[in-house]
Image (cartoon, grey):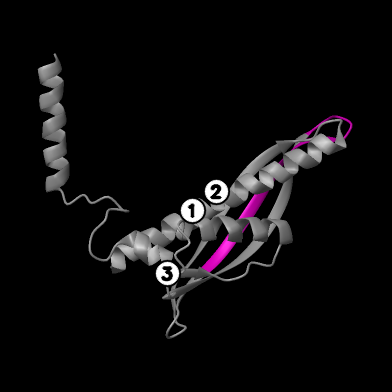
Amino acid sequence: MKRISLALLTGALLMLGACGFQPLYATRDGNVSEALERVQVSAIEQPDPAGWLLQRDLTSRLDPNARAAAPTHTLDVTLSERRTRLGIQIDGSVTRFNYALTGNFRLMDAASGETVLSSRSVSIAAYNVVNSQFATLTAEKDARRKAAEQLSADIELQLALYFAKTE
C-alpha cells in the first residue's frame, strides 16, 4: 500500500512540475519577495485606528526583515469602515454587528509616479454586543484588528500576483 501511495505521489509531483507550476514566493531571479520589500507603504490616516493597524501590518508583511531597501514602488491605501446590524431582538436592541473594512489601493512606480496597479479589497469581521460595555468595546476592537489583518493579507497577495506577472 505504501508503494502505491509513493508511486501516486511521485507521479503527481512530476505532472505538477510539467505543467509549469512555480511557487509564488519561490527564490529565483526577479524574486517576488524582494519586489515586495521595495514597496513603501504611504501613511494611512483614515479611519484612524484601522488605518494605523493596516499600515503597521502591511509594512511588516511586505518587509518582514525591515531591510529598508530603496523603494521602487509606493502603495497608497484609502480606507472606509462600516458597521452593519445583524442580530436584532424583538425590542429593537442589537446583539451582533458586522464590521466591514474596505481598502482601495494604488501601487505606483516610484520613479515615474505612474499607477501600475489599482484594486480594491474588502474584509469583514463580526462581533457580539453583550451586557458589559467593556466587553463589547473589546470585541469591536478585536474585530477591527482582525479585519485589518485580513485586508493586509489580501493586499499583499494582490501585490505578489502583480509582481509575479511582471518580474
For the residues marked 2 and 3, what is the alpha-carbon distance in whole angstroms? 21 Å
Residue of label 2 = 150
- Picture quarter containing residue 12? top left
Q: Earlier in the sequence, mark 3 or mark 1?
A: 3
Residue of label 3 = 38
Q: Is residue 119 above or below residue 14?
A: below
Instruction: Evaluate if marks 1 and 2 touch, with contact meaning CB atoms under 8 Å apart.
Output: yes
Give neighbour class at mark 2: few <14, some 14-19, many 20+ (Cα, 10 Å): many
Q: Mark 3 or 1, which is nearer the eye?
A: 3
Give the x, y percent position of residue 161: 36, 59
Q: Secondary structure at mark 1?
A: helix
Residue of label 1 = 154
For the residues marked 1 and 2, what is the alpha-carbon distance in whole angstroms? 6 Å
Give the x, y percent position of residue 89: 82, 30
Q: Provide the residue span drawn in magenta.
A: 88-105
**Which amino acid type is shown beneath numbered disc 2?**
Gln
Q: Is residue 145 magenta?
A: no
